[in-house]
Amino acid sequence: MTVMSDVLEKFVRAANYLSAAQIYLKDNVLLTEPLKPEHIKPRLLGHWGTCPGINFTYAHLNRAIIAHDVNMLFVLGPGHGFPAVQANLFLEGTLSKYFKEITHDTTGLAHMARMFSWPYGYPSHSNPEAPGVILEGGELGYSLSTSYGAILDNPDLIVACLVGDGEAETGPTATAWHLNKLIDPGKNGAVLPILHLNGYKISGPTFMGRMNDDELRSLFWGYGYEPHFVDAYKEEDVHNRMMNVLDDAIEAIRFTQHCAREGTLHENPRFPMIILRTPKGWGSIDYIEGNKIEDNCLSHQVIADQAKTNEGQRKQLEDWLRSYRFHELFDGQKFDDDIQSLIPREGRRMGDNPHAHGGEPIYKPLVLPAIEEYDKETTCDLTSPICGTESGMEKIGAYLRDAIRANEHNRNLRIMSPDETYSNKLHAVFEVTKRAFVWPYKDWDKDMAWDGRVLEMLSEHSLQGLLQGYVLTGRHGVFVSYEAFVQIVASMADQYAKFLKIAREVKWRGTIPSLNYILTSGAWRQEHNGFSHQNPGFIDGVLQRQGCFTNVYFPADANSALAAFDIMMKSTKEINVLVCEKRPLPVWRTLAEAKRDMEDGVSIWEFASDEDPHVIFAAAGDYPTLEALAAISLVRTYVPALRIRFVNIASLSALGIGNSQCRVLRHNFKYYFTDDKPVIVNFHGYPQTMKQVLFDYALNPQRFIVHGYEESGSTTTPFDMMVRNRVDRFHLAMEAFAKAAEQKIITEAEAQRLISEFQEKLAEHRTYVIEHGEDLAEITNWTWQSRL
Ligand SMILES: Cc1ncc(C[n+]2csc(CCOP(=O)(O)OP(=O)(O)O)c2C)c(N)n1
Ligand SMILES: [Mg+2]
């Protein structure tokens, strides 16, 4: 053993004791007296097995930080190893800096141990209240992509990412190894993946744990890494081996970056990774009542879990805890000098890395163009709709292009998209940037560069992880996805929302940008792709989040889309979803009107509204708005006496209609919807989604009739797709005829006659599309006519 190995061994010993103490002890935390049942927590909650490997890694990273003066952040995949993280945060003094109760002495230590996994104490998993944490690691699989997101545009930063071997079996981790192919070492930092092969997950062996070194070497070489093995089973001095490997890894990273930065790196870079084999539950209890614990999955959670009541187990627990000889390492005030020598200087401690804490100077607001610059020159008067057509996505593409250009000096804006930047009509951005790609090119490859600001990969998981890592380290981005397939990351979005909900309350977590989604290629224009491409369910999950930080925007036209996107990009600490069509659609609103609509979240559109209405039409979404307006013009023609109001719902949040960012409505609910008139709502998503939002408002909810996506799709015409889900003008008009009869504007018989006539129209439409393969010209060419 080298001298340094001894130093490291002491540090790991202290961290292991602190980890175990948190899991078991509510009193007698220094074991100054024999261990008694009353010292042991009544509910033993925590995960021990992963901790020794984490502590080993953390100690070595500390040494490397000091030796090489590295700016390093630590991302832990298996977040259930939080006792180890907390132990290290205690050792390095970071906890005392942020929690006044956790003083750097016996009192603080006792408090930390007692309150771990304790009601209203410290959570069992990594969490936003813990300094340095940008990943919960409760739901496994996201450590690698989050780490890659954090190092983008942070050329000085190395993220050490500990990936569990169980975690490595997840789809998101499996795909995230490829993210090295997006990283230009000239302009970005580096991820150092440390694959922790402790051989087991909860109840069985892991695949990678049972793969031999050759198999693993081939696999990770194939992914483009240079694997270094550290094997605690084989090495006589595993500390020495890990030291050498880490020194080599950091030097290799720096050499590659140096070459890239001075322009001498011409091949795709090969960054190092570490494959660390350790026994699960390393150095704890070998057998309990004949069952193998150490080096087996049985060490995953609490071992000796009957210690409070079973004397034999208590004795084993006590012997194990005393084996760390913690009293030799900590005198109640301070740690042994060797241990202190492994604490990086202030500013270099992993738990206190400013990149994880948001706020200035890590966070810089974007320099954004004024949306007025994108006012399309029109020849018609926008106050009398309609005034031509425009694509919302193209408009956003132009705005993003200019935003990327305007923020090039800060390098803090990125676009993530699964292979769809062109198809989603954001191609204007390629006038100023490219798609990142550092593996070889063919002559005919288009818009690719090592340093592109657009990250394309056909892995929604990886993109979501990248964006989370990027945003949580203070930079801005947008994830553009097909609406149906963003569901793949619904759970990740949910995990992020939980993180954000807590993080927003943590005082020392500074400002971070919002996590912004654009969902396009929505359900209504999947007539060529069909049923599989229809799913407006993602917004449901977003609207379930309680609080003021989730917003879903439903712009009805291109001006509204731009106004909403501008709000999203300026906002902070939120999750925003923009549901936006990419094809040209009628422009209903001037930019000024659009801006106001988006700020209010709900508005009455005067051009389609009468005073004192009998019936209200409301719509959220582009096609739903178009059809609702078409329905209004039909109803006006057939029942001129019926007074109608049109209300556009531009945004929803968990708090309801238009309540985005916790703003209250400009006017009360009654102002828009009256309190007794029937309301025919045409909604972009599932009707249930809108019904649950309305439930809280409506005194008599039965007056709201909600049309929306009803899981009826196929390969058909655009208008037929609407008809199949009853969000088309004819179905909506029929609802209005029935309501007109109820209010005695027309007779019941007249209503029935009109409804039959419209049913015939629908039948005629159906026959026509089957025969001709396209929609009736009167539908396709329909335009709004102002009331004469
Ligand atoms: C996506 C996901 N699926 C299942 C679980 C339940 N779970 C918690 S820990 C664990 C095993 C993790 O094994 P590994 O990554 O090897 O961690 P370690 O051995 O270091 O504890 C599982 C399956 C989870 N947290 N996340
Ligand atoms: Mg494991």
Image (tube, rainbow, N blue to C red):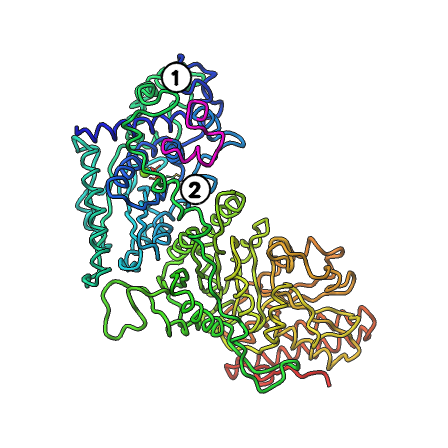
- Outermost residue, top direction? 34
Q: Quick one: label 1 or label 2, which is nearer the N terminus? A: 1
Compute the Cα span from label 1 to label 2.
Answer: 31 Å
Read off the residue under disc 1.
31
From the image, tell me which residue sits under label 2.
138
Residue type at mark 2?
Gly
Q: Which residues are magenta?
A: 91-108
The residue that appears at 38% across and 18% down in the rendered structure is 313
Q: Callout 1: helix, strand or loop?
A: loop
Q: Residue 28 colored magenta?
A: no
Please say whether residue 219 is visible from this viewpoint. no
Location of residue 75 (image quadrant): top left
Q: Give 631 or 217, whichever is nearer the viewer.
A: 217
- Position of 13 relative to 254 (above/below): above
Name the foreground residue: 431 vs 101.
101
Q: Nearer the viewer, mark 1 or mark 2?
A: 1
